[in-house]
Image (spheres, grey):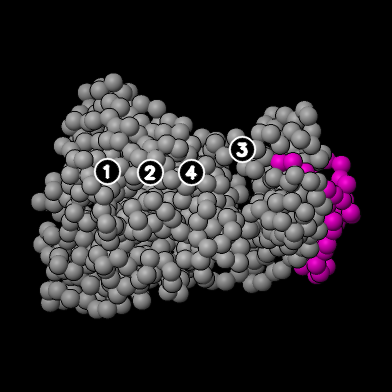
Amino acid sequence: MKGIRFGFWISLAVLFAASSAIVLFTHPRIARAQVGTPPSSTISSTSGPLAWDFGPVGAGTVVNVGIQDICPPGLCDDHDLTVVLPAPAVTFYQTMTARLTFKYTWTSTLPSDLDIFAISPNGADHGPGSPDDTSTGPGEEDLTVTDPIDGFWHIRSVASLTPVPTAAHVVVTLAIAPRPTAPIPPPPAPGAPTFINYPAPNDCTGTQQPPSCIQPALGSTTASTHGAGEPSIGVDWATRKVFFQAGNHTLRVTFNDSINPASAFWEDKRSPFARLSLDPIGFVDDGHFGGPNRVFTAQLNLVTSETSFTDDDANTWFPTQGSGQPAGVDHQTVGAGPYAFPAPLTPTGYPHGVYYCSQDIVTAFCSRSDDGGVTFGAGIPIYTFTTVNGVDLPIAPGTCGGLHGHVRVSPDGTVYVPNEKCFDANRVSRPGVAVSTDNGLSWAVRTVPDGKSISPGSDPSVAAGANNTIYFGYVNSDGHAKIAVSHDRGLTWSKSQDAGTPFGIQNAEFAEVIAGDDNRAAFAFLGTQTSGDTQSSDFQGVWHLYVAFTYNSGHTWTTVDATPTDPVQRGCIWNQGGSNPCRNLLDFNDITVDRFGRVLVGYADGCTGSCVTDSTQNASTGPASAQDALATIARQVGGRGLFKAFDGTQLGTGSGDIEGHGKLCFGDPASGIQGDPGCKAAN
């Protein structure tokens, strides 16, 4: 959700177990007396590994609420580490790179979660380590700080949820190497997919009138175009209207393809029933798998949502029950698709089942509507009392945790809910999906065997092709954008491929996947060539929106930079809730496809105005132009789309490829370019 997530409610009983009077947010960062051995040490590239023991810590808060910054006794233990580089950091890192690595281990008799944090001399937090999960017996987190600055660091052992005070051990290494040369991004080949970005206009004021501005809906003072974190996007396949959900405002966008490039007309068509918004979700049950193009908006309201729908492109809205019960209090998602056989009898004849899913950190619920989203049945747990890869196992291996992604339904009626942290049969935390083949009545968790969870991480994404091939995009534990393919509902998977390799992407966020024909899919993500801790306030990465396409069932992928001259974010992207300055983008983006196979990505642009060209601006320190969340659509204008039937028609417009200087070019470098004479010539 947009503010502090509700997950901390489950830990209030243990919040102050170790100290009865702790103020969490107002104390300055101060050094604490250590009970570990030794209390301080110094490391350099020539000193070799160091090791020490942390004193016992207990209780905890489950979520990151800043305990590591004040380090209260009992909840936290501190070690003072001095980092010595061969030369001052400002000059050393011009030609060299370094990695400060912590191997942090403990043994507990009860399910426990300890965290390690490294706090730099300038006060930037690095941590927790990975995997950030709960274990009984031996436990471990690994934390790596890339290019640490020299000076005095606080290394802290923190109880996240530790029923019995538990000591920990850490081994630290500092390694240096020559800085690798950044790869030169490949130029877009003629016929490769290309995009034009359409930012939403500002609110109309004074005498200014649309289309140069957007008129807020009746009763609103703003259209929320600069508060578009966690956007959703969908297309009415009948009218071609595009719907972008920004907060509790549903923005309708009309593209005019009679001119080149197409123009975009934005309107605020907010539902009058979308009042409170703890989390916004928009969804269009489009014609992809035979949907009637019903548009939904759902605004989280504790254990339900203020959900409404429209059948006339947001001119008229109707309220609904919101969700089934029980339901979770966070991160809801709405989706729809065909029923699995045997289909239930439906009271209204609406062709699709509509699903509402939400989560409570350690469990999640999905409920189904059989009347087009007007009313919902009971909420059914999708993680608890389940199976893994078809085998009955104890609850723990069949459980996912934290936030899940958007629910998606395949043509055969299988329902998928992706999650970054699911336990496999060996209790290893991996990206996976909760799968239902009986219209949401029962669920099984299926994990990607060569993926490993990143912590903290953003939602993965899943989509199904026309013959039920599923494509699963996620961020791996190394920060790379990975995608895997399954032809049997997630029982087995192809080897995951790194979609960021052509651009040297070292960190990724916000995986979003959509499919068309069974062998075609697109995978969008934010990526940066900068390695290191993306959660830290001193992270200096520059982020762009990338989209990878496959036209052969995932055997090869063609990746393009959809924002080559306009960064989406400078600095960190925060994934841990609360009100961190780097949380301007919130938790996810979204992706869809129109009837011609054109890919559209809805995203919040965090770097606008002066931030675009000023490298000194960043999300940590501002200014506002570097902490924006502007509603923006990246719309495909060139290359092949996701439906073969429209190859050669330039996504249904016949207007020619802008990158190909007006020539009608389609295809991709991996499988060849086709079209008018001269298409294969380099620009």
The residue labelled by disc 3 is: 10
For disc 2, the marked residue is: 367
**Mark 3 in CB contact with mark 4 (< 8 angstroms):** no
Give how far apart the Cα atoms at labels 2 and 3 are.
Answer: 23 Å
Stretch in magenta: 32-60
Left or right of residue 402, residue 156 in this image: right
Residue 56, horizontal then vertical, whole percent: 83, 48
Sequence-wise, which precedes: disc 2 or disc 4?
Answer: 4
Look at mark 1 in the image and give the residue it sits on. 370
Mark 3 / mark 1, whichever is N-terminal = 3
Near mark 4 (Cα within 10 A), the count class, few <14, some 14-19 or many ≥20, is many
Q: Residue at x 60, y 35 (%)?
A: 9
Q: How much space separates mark 3 and mark 4, taking CA atoms?
A: 13 Å
Judging from the image, what secondary structure is the residue with disc 4 in? strand
Residue type (three-letter) at the residue carrying disc 2: Ser
Amino acid identity at mark 4: Gln
Could you give the CA–CA distance between mark 2 and mark 1, rounded to whole angstroms? 10 Å
**Label 4, on which residue?**
359
Q: Is residue 523 above or below residue 294?
A: below
